[in-house]
Amino acid sequence: LIEEAAIGRSRCFHHGGREAVGQCTDCSRSFCRECFVEHEGRLLCAPCLERLIGAGDTDESPQPLRRTVLHVLWAVGGFTLTWLWFVLLGLLLVNFPDTFHNPNLFS
Ligand SMILES: [Zn+2]
Ligand SMILES: [Zn+2]
């Protein structure tokens, strides 16, 4: 097996029993059909694809994060306002004159 690989009949980097169909365009290692992923017209292995996608994400990640923070702030603000409204309503009801609860006093 080792001799075979040395001769040039390359095997998959992950699956020693499988014949490689090509080389990763990024790390130049040989992989079988199953290990390859096509990304923007390039054949990549899974680790290289993850690395490329991860590297591309770092540029755009701050904005979605800020948007998420805004959403959370809006949600918390809305919840607080609703809560305040109910507290005020409760206070109003509690402080209403007794006549409101006992209309019979006037009759
Ligand atoms: Zn690779
Ligand atoms: Zn493989």
Image (cartoon, helix red, strand yellow):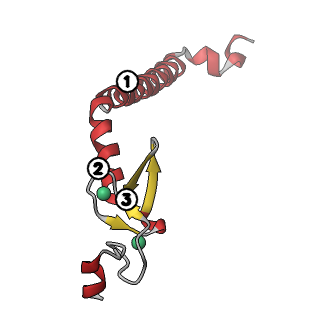
> Which residue does the numbered mark 1 point to in the structure image?
70
Separation (CA) of disc 1 from disc 3: 34 Å
- 89 lies left or right of 12: right
In the rendered structure, which amino acid carries the disc numbered 3?
Ala
> Which residue does the numbered mark 3 point to in the structure image?
46
Q: Is residue 87 above or below residue 19?
A: above
Looking at the rendered structure, the secondary structure element under dot 1 is helix
In the image as oriented, which residue stretches furthest toward the right? 107
* Image quadrant assignment for residue 20: bottom left
CB-based contact (under 8 Å), mark 1 and mark 2:
no
In the rendered structure, which amino acid carries the disc numbered 2?
Arg
- Where does residue 67 sit, x and y in percent of width and height? 38, 25
**The CB of the residue at mark 1 lies under 8 Å from ligand 1:** no
CB-based contact (under 8 Å), mark 2 and mark 3:
no
Residue placed most toward the observer, 87 or 93: 87
> Which residue does the numbered mark 2 point to in the structure image?
51
Separation (CA) of disc 2 from disc 3: 9 Å
**The CB of the residue at mark 3 lies under 8 Å from ligand 1:** yes
Q: Residue at x 28, y 58 (%)?
A: 28
- 19 lies left or right of 50: right
Mark closer to the observer (1, 2): 2
